């Protein structure tokens, strides 16, 4: 079947299998920031923005994206570098596999709420798992990013 959608503000038309997940489709289109950690909606590594909202692309059929706008980190380089820098500075960038999912979820959070509390950051990022760290480094990074972004 054919699908028409926008990815990172570009019109895309492609052939897909009806049962293909959005995660597999995006990687087939070479959006390699979209990772696969579990395929069972548990790890957050496959997070992308669908019409500006974070979703787990392993849990959405590509066909459901027909007519919608998808954003991946490839289209959000500036924000990704800014947030990623704060995470790395706090030592939370070890194998790095979880980073794209964390960063895209954080981008969505700060777009919706430019000044989230520490608790709100924790709640937003609770669906993103990291096998290497104890999560404290990511939290410090996001808090410092919030302070920097808000000029404090
Ligand atoms: S790969 Fe989608 S949540 Fe883990
Ligand atoms: S840094 Fe390795 S999974 Fe998070």
Image (tube, rainbow, N blue to C red):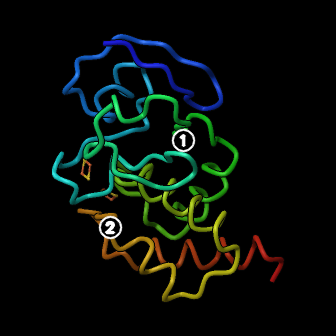
Q: Quadrant of the N terminus?
A: top left
In the rendered image, residue 105, in percent from the top left (x then y), is placed at 49, 60
Taking the image as four quarters, which one is ligand 2 found in? bottom left
Q: Is residue 59 above or below residue 114?
A: above
The foreground one among 66 and 83 is 66
Q: Quadrant of residue 146?
A: bottom right
Pointer 1: what residue? 73
State the SS at label 2: helix
Relative to 91, is 79 on the left or the right? right
Q: Is residue 92 above or below residue 96?
A: below
Pointer 2: what residue? 127
In the image, what residue occupies the spot 56% across and 72% down? Answer: 142
Q: Earlier in the sequence, mark 2 or mark 1?
A: 1
Relative to 40, is 73 on the left or the right? right
Q: Is residue 131 above or below residue 52?
A: below
Contact between labelled residues 1 and 2, with CB atoms less than 8 Å apart: no
In the image, what residue occupies the spot 16% across and 51% down? Answer: 40
In the rendered image, residue 34, in percent from the top left (x then y), is placed at 39, 38
Q: Quadrant of residue 66?
A: top left
Does mark 2 have its CB less than 8 Å from ligand 1? yes
State the separation of the CA atoms marked 2 and 1: 18 Å
| Mark 2 Cα-neighbour bin, 10 Å: few <14, some 14–19, many ≥20 | some
In the rendered image, residue 3, in percent from the top left (x then y), is placed at 41, 19
The foreground one among 34 and 57 is 57
Q: Quadrant of the C terminus?
A: bottom right
State the SS at label 1: helix
In the image, what residue occupies the spot 34% across and 50% down? Answer: 56
């Amino acid at each position: 079947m054919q699908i028409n959608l926008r990815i990172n503000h570009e019109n895309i038309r492609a052939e897909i299998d009806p049962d293909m997940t959005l995660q597999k489709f995006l990687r087939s289109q070479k959006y390699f920031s979209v990772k696969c950690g579990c395929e069972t909606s548990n790890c957050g590594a496959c997070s992308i923005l669908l019409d500006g909202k974070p979703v787990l692309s392993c849990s959405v059929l590509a066909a459901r994206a027909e007519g919608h706008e998808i954003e991946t980190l490839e289209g959000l380089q500036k924000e990704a570098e800014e947030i990623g820098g704060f995470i790395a500075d706090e030592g939370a960038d070890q194998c790095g596999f979880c980073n794209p999912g964390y960063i895209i979820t954080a981008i969505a959070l700060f777009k919706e709420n430019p000044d989230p509390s520490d608790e709100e950051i924790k709640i937003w990022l609770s669906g993103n798992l990291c096998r290497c760290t104890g999560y404290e480094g990511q939290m410090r990074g996001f808090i410092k990013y919030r302070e920097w972004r808000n000029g404090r």
